[in-house]
Amino acid sequence: MDADAVLGMLQEVADEVINPRFRSLESGQIHEKAPGDLVTDADREAEVVITARLEAEFPDAVVLGEEAFASDPISLARYSAAAHAFTVDPIDGTKNFVNGSRDHATMMSESRNGEVVRAWIWQPQHELAYVAELGAGAFRNGERLQRPTAGDDPSAWRPVTSRRRWVGRELPGLQPFELTWVCCGVDYPQLVQGAADVVLYGPPRPWDHAPGGLLLTEAGGYLGTSDGRDYLPQGPEYPGLLAAADRATYDVVVGLLSSRG
């Protein structure tokens, strides 16, 4: 499937399974995988459809879905060892979706030999499609994206975080961290488009960060771990991630994090 066909498939599934339930969920369609970790019938049904279509098209690939992982944790190990793999996040930002916020997304990534080569983020309520391909660039609704540098004044940078205990905290010379859009499928596009300059995340899961990570790096930004290492979605466990407007910004902030001990 070419990139446009994959995007069309994600949009079709969103139209058929996700959008009809937006702001129309019944209590019996909302569940908890763990305390505070929500999943809806729309999440589960959309992932089943997307996974089935991918497996039919790419029978030798491993498909790692967020909801499948919840019931089969060993699927993460299969994904990590796969030469050809996909991640599927049927509704990123499920809490936002449940609460009626338009800030949610359907996301997917493709990896070859451990490297993310294609990524898709579809924000159905905003009607925005973000597509990236390794070496070919990042695009929003077909228009190329280029992240400008953050500049040389760290005090002018806007840092945001999904780690709620970090909200309001400061690193030397930076503004206090603000809360993100609480959805990686919105956070990364906002970072690329300049609404933030730094995003600090906790321990990552590949379905959350593989799509946005490729979008960011193809637009000229940088994604690494919060302790200064390269980030590989099929790699080991990491303590956290740091996404930045550019490598220079990342280096400054990761240095500040390191100096905290």
Image (cartoon, grey):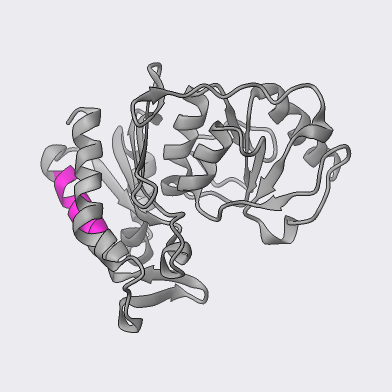
Q: Residue at (31%, 77%) from the top-left corner?
A: 29
Task: Give x and y (percent) for residue 139.
Answer: 39, 27
Q: Where is the C terminus found, in terms of image quarters?
A: top right
Q: Along the horizontal axis of the image, is 136 left or right of 17?
A: right
Instruction: Determine the main secondary structure of the stretch shown in magenta.
Output: helix
Task: Give x and y (percent) for residue 138.
Answer: 42, 25
* Residue 60 position (above or below residue 73): above
Task: Give x and y (percent) for residue 83.
Answer: 30, 32
Name the residue nearer the viewer: 15 or 28. Answer: 15
- The magenta stretch is 46-55
Residue with the most extreme left position: 56
Residue with the most extreme bottom position: 28
Question: Which quarter of the picture shows residue 113?
Answer: top left
Q: Along the horizontal axis of the image, is 135 left or right of 59?
A: right
The magenta stretch spans residue 203: no
Q: Residue at (42%, 69%) from the top-left corner?
A: 98
* Residue 192 position (above or below residue 75): above
Name the residue nearer the viewer: 79 or 210. Answer: 210
Q: Along the horizontal axis of the image, is 34 left or right of 238?
A: left
Q: Along the horizontal axis of the image, is 256 left or right of 64?
A: right
Residue with the most extreme right position: 172
Residue with the most extreme top position: 135
Q: Residue at (67%, 38%) from the top-left corner?
A: 198
* Residue 106 position (above or below residue 242): below
